[in-house]
Image (cartoon, rainbow, N blue to C red):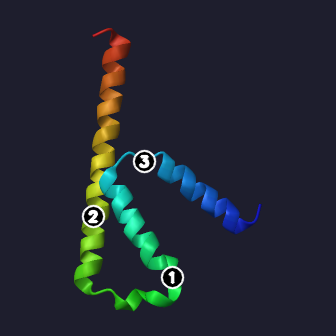
Amino acid sequence: MTNIEIIKQKIINQVMGMDNEQALEVLYDVMVKFGNPSSIIEDELTDEEWDEIEVDIKEIEEEEISQQEEVIEHLKQWKSGK
């Protein structure tokens, strides 16, 4: 496997493990924009667009952490027989 194929497989594995619709939508939008390298240059994004991306990423990360904490709590309760 080439490095590109390995990276593609890693991306596929990550996407298949995601259940967060908002995260998948953001990822899809980014992939579409960068799918055609000549159509976008990093500097073409406005500061507001970069701010929105950062806010979206933080929200996604916070939601994932919350979901992980919830799963941990459920496992603790299950282990204790409650």
Q: Which residue is mark 2?
A: 56
Q: Which residue is mark 3?
A: 18
Residue 22 placement (x, y as % from top left): 30, 56
The image quadrant that residue 19 belongs to is top left
The three-letter amino acid code for the residue at tag 3 is: Met
Q: Residues within 10 Å of mark 2 (few under 14, many from 20)?
A: some
Earlier residue among tags 2 and 1: 1
Report helix, strand or loop for mark 3: loop
The three-letter amino acid code for the residue at tag 1 is: Asn
Who is closer to the viewer here, 50 or 21?
21
Report helix, strand or loop for mark 2: helix
Mark toward the viewer: 1 or 3: 1
Instruction: Pick the quarter of the image with the N terminus.
Output: bottom right
Q: How many discs appear?
A: 3
Q: Residue at x 69, y 63 (%)?
A: 5
The image quadrant that residue 6 belongs to is bottom right
Mark 2–mark 3 distance (CA, rounded to whole Å): 16 Å
Who is closer to the viewer here, 45 or 32?
32
Q: Residue at x 63, y 62 (%)?
A: 7
Contact (CB < 8 A) between labels 2 and 3?
A: no
Is residue 50 depicted above or below 6 in this figure? below
The image quadrant that residue 8 belongs to is bottom right
Q: Which residue is mark 1?
A: 36
Is residue 39 depicted above or below 56 in this figure? below
